[in-house]
Image: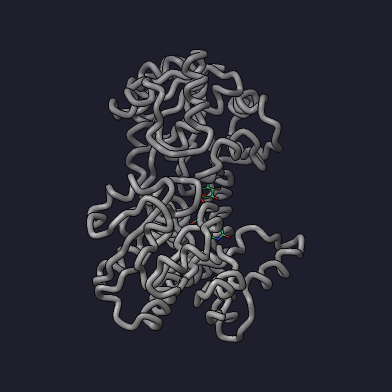
């Protein structure tokens, strides 16, 4: 099938590449000529495992094209996916101006029936607005349908998530459009859930909020573990063995970050408020998440007393492993708080240092070439992102290069017993303090 994706950011590009891989003829549109130039040269502007190879392969086989022209895109695809940003506004609600603009641009180019699909994460009832907008700007009589088809990609495993999804959600109010969408997803082996548009939109916000709730739940339990001497890792294992609960998203740590969870939870709270059905449970989820960073910084101050001029090493800058994304990264927030207090921070991240250097205050931070160099001469080491590389560092060498062997493990990555054996004082999240042996 001929498909068009408008917006070649994280979601749009990955979706376009995976559709092409499945045999569709895909045209990706973006209004940033520089981005399109980069993509045409076979390079991708983000680090995402498997994506670059897939993009290159499908560009060569001519199943994947890039353009800056919305008109070409609308002419090309029988299905047009909207995958433009939906950034947060100061009150937590979503800025839908990019969606509205694209809806107008599509409308004026429409000549014959198209299915217009909302892929971006949007508040419930956005589909209705998109349909109204297109109707208002399109030529009289031109046929179209609007569908909601939310994405559930995780950064770092976006290609696998799209190629083998847990489920495909298609929300539409017309049989004609639903039949077209079933055809789009025919090559994928996954259960398809068909709903109305509003329910599909709600599924996305409700799913992300539920996952965030799991994270805040275990972080609140971690606080009780610290007070009582229990081990949150064992508690998570024990409750996760109950199939009704499951072990995933019960990793206690510095809390959730990234470009989705903080924004989506705030948006869900805002839309619930607007509808007159306040979602106070999610406000508590946010509070617990914010408290994780405060408590962690307090524990560092408690151990080191004054942070000014203290040399502190930080491992990890991205918001989670296997990505170079530092947007709403808790790791970057911690580094910023430390440098603001005058600490002398040296950081290392396997992939995110380039993106980190684009943050306006990043020049206050030294960057190292590897984890050991970051830790050289440090009075404390913070593990802020759980990159696998960090768990393979030689603890003997690490202790030798540090000035004082103190580890704050914000992601419970390292083994406390091994750390203490090598002479470290180790503090994890919800694991108590393990003094050096
Ligand atoms: C998320 C959703 O998982 C995905 O379905 C949606 O489409 C986009 O938002 P992503 O933001 O890429 O994906 O990351 P995810 O793996 O969900 O992690 C989000 C945050 O939660 C990260 O900061 C991560 O470190 C944190 N997290 C995750 C925890 O603190 N504990 C956990 O157990 C799991």
The x, y position of residue 100, in whole percent, is 35, 37
Q: Residue at x 50, y 51 (%)?
A: 321
The N terminus lies in which quarter of the figure? top right
Vertical order, 320 against 303 (above or below): above
- Residue 45 lies left or right of residue 123; in this view the side is left
**Can the viewer see residue 124?**
yes
* Count of number-bearing discs: 0
Instruction: Give the camera-side residue of 193 and 257.
Output: 257
Front in this rendered view, residue 134 or 83: 83
Q: Is residue 274 visible?
A: no
Nearest the viewer among 309 and 220 is 309
Q: Quadrant of residue 314?
A: bottom left
Above-or-below relation of 132 to 23: below
- The picture quadrant where one finds residue 70 is top left
Determine whether, in the image, residue 14 is placed left or right of residue 34.
Answer: right
> In the image, what residue occupies the spot 59% across and 75% down?
221
Q: Position of residue 43 (x, y in %)?
A: 39, 27
**How far across and down, in percent of the image, does residue 318 sit?**
42, 52
Q: Is residue 329 left or right of residue 37?
A: right
- Residue at 31%, 69% (x, y): give it: 311
Report the residue at 47% width, 37% height from top. 11
Q: At which x and y percent is residue 408?
A: 46, 71
Q: Residue furthest bottom?
A: 228
Quarter of the image with the C terminus is bottom right
Closer to us: 84 or 381: 381
């Amino acid at each position: 099938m001929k498909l068009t994706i408008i917006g070649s950011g994280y979601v749009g590009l990955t979706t376009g590449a995976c559709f092409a891989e499945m045999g569709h003829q895909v045209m990706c549109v973006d209004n940033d000529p520089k981005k399109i130039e980069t993509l045409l040269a076979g390079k991708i502007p983000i680090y995402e495992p498997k994506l670059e190879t897939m993009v290159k392969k499908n560009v060569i086989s001519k199943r994947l094209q890039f353009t800056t022209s919305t008109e070409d895109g609308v002419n090309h695809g029988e299905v047009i996916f909207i995958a433009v940003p939906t950034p947060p506004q100061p009150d937590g609600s979503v800025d839908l101006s990019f969606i509205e603009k694209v809806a107008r641009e599509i409308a004026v180019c429409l000549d014959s029936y198209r299915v217009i699909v909302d892929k971006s994460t949007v508040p419930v009832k956005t589909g209705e607005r998109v349909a109204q907008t297109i109707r208002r700007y399109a030529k009289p009589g031109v046929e179209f349908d609007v569908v909601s088809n939310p994405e559930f990609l995780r950064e770092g495993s976006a290609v696998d998530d799209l190629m083998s999804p847990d489920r495909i959600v298609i929300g539409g109010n017309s049989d004609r459009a639903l039949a077209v969408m079933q055809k789009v997803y025919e090559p994928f082996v996954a259960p398809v859930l068909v709903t109305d548009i509003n329910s599909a939109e709600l599924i996305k916000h409700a799913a992300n909020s539920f996952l965030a709730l799991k994270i805040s739940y275990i972080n609140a339990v971690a606080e009780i573990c610290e007070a009582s001497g229990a081990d949150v890792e064992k508690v998570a294992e024990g409750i996760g063995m109950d199939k009704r609960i499951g072990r995933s998203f019960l990793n206690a740590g510095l809390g959730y970050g990234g470009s989705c969870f903080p924004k989506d939870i705030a948006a869900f709270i805002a839309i619930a408020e607007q509808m007159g059905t306040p979602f106070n449970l999610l406000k508590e989820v946010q509070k617990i998440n914010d408290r994780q960073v405060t408590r962690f910084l307090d524990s560092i101050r408690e151990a080191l007393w004054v942070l000014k001029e203290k040399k502190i090493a930080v491992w990890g800058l991205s918001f989670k492993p296997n990505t170079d994304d530092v947007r709403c990264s808790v790791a970057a927030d911690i580094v910023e708080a430390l440098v603001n207090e005058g600490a002398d921070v040296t950081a290392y991240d396997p992939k995110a240092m380039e993106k980190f250097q684009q943050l306006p205050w990043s020049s206050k931070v030294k960057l190292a070439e590897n984890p050991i160099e970051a830790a050289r001469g440090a009075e404390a080491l913070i593990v802020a992102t759980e990159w696998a590389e960090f768990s393979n560092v030689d603890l003997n060498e690490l202790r030798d290069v540090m000035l004082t062997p103190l580890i704050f493990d914000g992601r419970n990555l390292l083994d406390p017993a091994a750390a203490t054996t090598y002479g470290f004082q180790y503090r994890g999240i919800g694991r108590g303090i393990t003094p050096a042996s």
